[in-house]
Amino acid sequence: MGISLFLRLTIPLFAHSSLTQCHYKNQPLYGKVKIVENLPDFKIKVVSSFPQLKVQWVNAFPNRCGQWQSVEHFPDFTVQFVEHFPDFTVQFVEHFPGISAISERGNS
């Protein structure tokens, strides 16, 4: 009984933190991004393997899942790099940005 109560209380927390259809908290995970030190829209942790999102930096037209363009003004969202308690993990890639296969299986 105690385990089922624990699972009922914690599963929604993990479900909310998942990436779905390249969105997190109803925000598309592509677009113009500003890196900030305080009050970010998303806290992200950079990892070298098994990321939730693969990110490709582009110079223009960040209109596909995982494509980010660095800007100083008028960002679509802001991010802060953290080591602990990220909203999601990212890996920077040169090709094939988007939700990782592991994250897609976890969201099914």
Image (cartoon, rainbow, N blue to C red):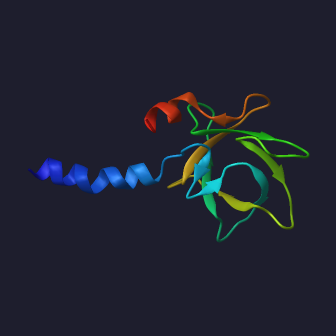
Residue 71: where, in percent of width, then height? 86, 59
What residue is shown at x 87% (from left), y 46% (from top)?
A: 61
Front-most of residues 19 and 49: 19
Residue 56: where, in percent of width, then height? 77, 38
Front-most of residues 35 and 56: 56
What residue is shown at x 73% (from left), y 64% (from top)?
A: 36
Front-most of residues 22 and 49: 22
Residue 21: where, in percent of width, then height? 58, 42
- On the rendered structure, is 48 left or right of 63? left
Residue 28: where, in percent of width, then height? 66, 52
- On the rendered structure, is 86 left or right of 11? right
| Depicted 37 relative to depicted 19: above or below | below
Pick the quarter of the image with the C terminus: top left
Q: Report the residue that reaches farthest toward the right.
A: 59
What residue is shown at x 86% (from left), y 67% (from top)?
A: 73
Q: Report the residue that reaches farthest toward the left.
A: 1
Q: How many marks?
A: 0
| Depicted 36 relative to depicted 94: above or below | below
What residue is shown at x 46% (from left), y 39% (from top)?
A: 107
Q: In which image quadrant can residue 32 be found? A: bottom right
- On the rendered structure, is 22 left or right of 95? left
